[in-house]
Amino acid sequence: MQFLCAAMATAALAGVHGSDVLRDRLDNGLTLLMAPNCAAPVVALQAWVGVGSADEVEGEYGIAHVFEHMLFKGTARRGVGEIAQDVEGAGGEINAWTTFDQTVYHVVVASRDFDVGLDVMSDALQHSSFDPAELELEREVILEEIKQGADDPGRSVAQALFSTAYVRHPYGRPVIGTDASVRALSRERLLEFFRTWYVANNVTLVVAGDFDPGGVRAAVRRAFGDLPGRALPRRRVREPAQTRPRAAVVTQDVREAQIAVGFHIPALRSEDTAALDVLAVVLGQGESSRLTARVRRARELATSAYAYAHSLRDPGLFVVGMTVPPTTIGAALDEALVQVFRLAIEPIGDAEIDKARRVIEADAIYQEETAQGAARKLGFYERVAGRAEFEREYLDRVARTTASDVRAAAARYLRPDNATVAALLPSGGRLATARGRDARRARLIAAVGKAAARAAKSYAPPAPIAFASGVVRDVLPNGLRVIVRRDATVPIVAMRAVWLGGVRAETARNNGINYLLAALITRGCGELSAEQLAARVDDMAGVLSGFSGRNTFGLRAEWLAADWEAGLGLLADCIRAPALPHAEFLRERRRLLDEIAARSDSPSYVAFRLLQAELFRGHPYRFDVLGDEASVAKLSRKQLVDYYRNRYPVGDMVLVVVGDVDPERVLRRVRELFGDAPRRRLRGPARAAAGAAPSSGGPREVYGYLDRQQAHMVVGFPGTTVDDPDRYALDVLTTILSGQGGRLFVELRDRRGLAYRVGATSFEGVDPGYVAIYIACSPQKIEQAYEAIRSELRRIVHDKVSDDELRRAQRYLVGAHEIALQRRSAIASAMAFHEVYGLGVDEYARYAAAIDAVTPEDVQRVAATYLDWDAAVVATVRPPAFTPEAARRARGVVSKRRPARGPRRGRRGR
C-alpha cells in the first residue's frame, strides 16, 4: 500500500468527523468509511456488523457474542490460531467485541501490512468454517467468561440494573447470554444466524490511519465484492414507559457495596443527547463534579461516584453509580439522589456548563489521537446513530447547550417515577433470606421518593464556584533534567514529572506512603484549595494527578495545546508547594483503606499479591503499591510532608513535555518555575536482589481462598532488570506464549477449552522482577491447567521456537509498540521513565531494532535461564470448597512446596 503523505490535498484532516470522512458504497450494499491521516504509520480496520444481543430471539440468547469468539477460529484457508498468528506476525492486534446493538471485529496493523489485515478480515467474515469441535471448545471458554462476569461486582450490579429497568426490551438480557442459553446453542442455529445477519448491507467497514484512499477503495471492492446482501429482519419490541420506581438487590461475598441508579433516556439520535452528556459531566465526571465533591469528598460516603449517559440505538439509560462502604449505603444513596433531583430544580452555573462542554469537546479530540480511536468513533455513529455525520451535529449541539437546556433535560428524564435502583450488597445477615432482600428492595424504592422531597425542600441559591520535532534536553544548575519533544500533529500536550522511588523506597512500616502521597499531591497547591485546583483543571479539560509504582513516583498532566502554559504552572505549584491539607489527608487515607479492603475481593489481584509476597521475600517488591491496612492506618500527615520533602527534591526530577509546543518557550518557562529550587540530590536505594535465593526441591506454592466460581493461578519465576539486554528476548518469549495466536492460548483455550483467560507477562524493575503465567478457569480444571502450562514451558525450554513464531512475535511487539506510541502521553511516559532509569531519552526509539535482533537461540536461552522450576512460585486462589484445607481455613493463606514434576532444568546463576 502507498502511505498517505502530508502533502496529499484530498484528505489532510484537522479532525475525523463524519463530514470529513470519505464514503463509498459497494454494489452489494456494504458501506465503506475512510478517514486517512498520516500522523502515525498505523492503520485501523474495523468491521461493524449491525447485529447484537438485542436482535436475538428466544433460543438464540448469547449467539451474537459466540460469533465474536468463532469468527477467528479458522476458515477454509486458515486453521485454528492462524488468523491471530497472521495479524500478530504482521505486528498487529486483532480482537472483537459485542454490544446490544452490534458486533465489531477490529484489526490494527502497521500501514505497510494493511493488505494482511484486510485479507484476514475478509476471510473471517466470509469464509469462517465454524468447526463443530472448535465450537464445543469455545463454548467452554464462553462459559468460563460467564462465570468470570458473575464474579465481577461491577458487572453484576450493571446486569441487575438493566434487567430491572427493561421489562420487555432485550436490553434487559445479558449480552453474553446465560449458562443455559449458551449450552443450548447448536451449530445449525449458529449457521442460520450467520446467513441472516452477516450480509453485505449489514456491514460497515471503517478504515482509519495512514493509507491511500484510492488503493483501499479498490482493495475493499476486490475483497468484499462477492459478499451477498439480503433483507434484514427487525424484531425488537418497545419498552413500555416506566411509571414508578423499581429496585433490585443482589448479594455477593464483597467488602464494599455497589449501587447503580438508572433513568430511561431517548436513543442516541435524540436532540436531548447533547444536554444529557453535559448533565453527566456536571453530575459525575471529574474531581469538581457534584457527586465527587459532595458524596465522596465532602461527606465521605462513597469510595467512588460517577455518572454517564448510556445512549444506544434504542432508548438507553442515564446511570449514576457509586462504590460504597456497607456502613454508609443509605446515606450515600440519599445524598446522591438529592444531587440528581436538584439538577431539575435549581439553576445550574454557567461555569459548570462551560467546563462540561469543554470536557466533551476535548474527549472528541483525544479519540482522534489513535487510528483505532478514530475508526471506533466513526463506526459507532454510523451504526448506532445511522450516519457518521451525526457526530458533527452532536458536537454543534454540545457547543450550543445552555444551563437551561441541561435543567430541562434533568426535569424531563431524571424523575423519581423513572428511576431504577440496583444494589450489590455484602452477603449474609438478613439478606440471606428472600424476606430480607424484599425488605431492602422496599427501602431502596422508598429512598427515591424521600430524596426527591428533600431536594425540593432544600433548594437554595448555589454558592459561587471560585475559578482562579526533535527532542531538546537541558539540565538546570540544580540538577533538574528537562526534555521537550515537539509534535504538532494533534493540539495536545502531555507532561510527566518523575523521580526514582515508589514502593522500592518503602519499608514495612511506611508501605503505601507513596500511593497516598500521589493521591494528595494534587489536592490543592499554593493558595488554591483542593476544590479550586480541581475546578481549574476541569475548566481547561485537562488531566493533573499523581502516580506511584514499584520504582517511581511522579505527576502526570495533559492539556489542550492552548492551555499548556497555564497547565505547566499548576503542575509546578503542585510539585513545589503541595498543600497536603490535613482534612484531605484524613479523607484520602480513609478512601485508601477502603480501596485496599475492596481489592481483596478480586481473585486475580489476590493471586498476584500472593506471588509477589512469596517471590520477593526480603525485598520491597513484596509490598503492595497501595500499602496494607496496618501500615496505611498508622501514617500521619507529618510523615507524608517529611517524606516528600526529603525523598523528592527538584534536582532529582525528570520533567518531560511532549506535544504542540515551542521547545524554547517551554525551557524558558521551566527555568522560571524551577530554576530557584536549591541543588540537593538524594541517592536512591541501593540495587538489591529481589527475593530470597530459591532452594531445591521444586516450586513453592501459596494458596488464597475466595468464594468465586473460578480459580485463578499465577506461576512466577525470578526475572531481570530494566537495563538487562535479556529483557528483549523475554518480551519475545512471553509474546510467543501469549496472545490469541500464542502457545498457551492455542493449547489451553483453543484446543482444550480449559480457560477464558490465559497468558504470560514479565515485569522488569530497577531490581530483578518476575516472569509469570496467569490463568483463570473452573476449579475442577486447575490441576489440568497446571500440567498443561508445565508441558508448554518444558517444550519452549527444550526446543527452539520456529522462525515463523519468532517473526510473528517480533512483528507483533514492534507493531504494538508503534500503536502505543500514537499518544503523546505514552511518548512522554516512555521518555521520562527511560531517562530516570538511566537508559537514555531515546530508548523507546531503539526498541524495534533490539526486538528484531532477537534470535531463536536467544529465546531458548532466556527460557532455560528464567523458567527455572526450582525457583518458581505457584500462587492459587480457589473457592473454599475446592481447596484441600477447606475444612480448616476459610480465607487464610498457607505455603507449601509442590513436588517437582518432569526433568529439571539447570538453575540460573545469581
Image (spheres, grey):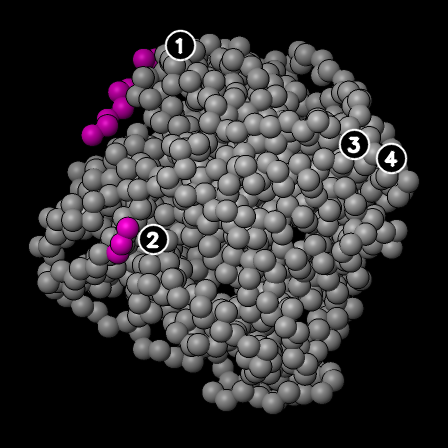
Q: Residues within 10 Å of mark 4 (few under 14, many from 20)?
A: few
Q: Are marks 4 and 2 in contact (CB under 8 Å)?
A: no
Q: Is residue 623 visible?
A: no
Q: Tell me the residue at 78%/32% (across/down).
A: 228
Q: Is residue 108 above or below residue 713?
A: above
In the image, 326 versus 862, the foreground residue is: 862
Q: Is residue 343 above or below residue 328?
A: above
Gap in Å between the C-alphas at discs 3 and 2?
Answer: 47 Å
Q: Which mark is residue 404?
A: 1
Residue beneath label 2, please?
A: 828
> Please, what secondary structure does the residue beneath circle 3 have?
loop
In the rendered structure, which disc, 4 or 1, sits on the residue that comes first in sequence?
4
Hey, which quadrant is residue 900 in on the image? bottom right
* Magenta span of residues: 459-471
Amino acid marked by disc 3: Pro
In the image, 361 versus 164, the foreground residue is: 361
Residue beneath label 4, please?
A: 192
Gap in Å between the C-alphas at discs 1 and 2?
Answer: 40 Å
Residue beneath label 3, please?
A: 228
- Residue 784 x, y percent position in the rendering: 78, 68
Gap in Å between the C-alphas at discs 1 and 3?
Answer: 49 Å
| Image side of residue 447 versus residue 882, left or right | left
Amino acid marked by disc 4: Glu
Q: Residues within 10 Å of mark 2 (few under 14, many from 20)?
A: many
Mark 4, mark 1: which one is toward the viewer? 4
Amino acid marked by disc 2: Ala
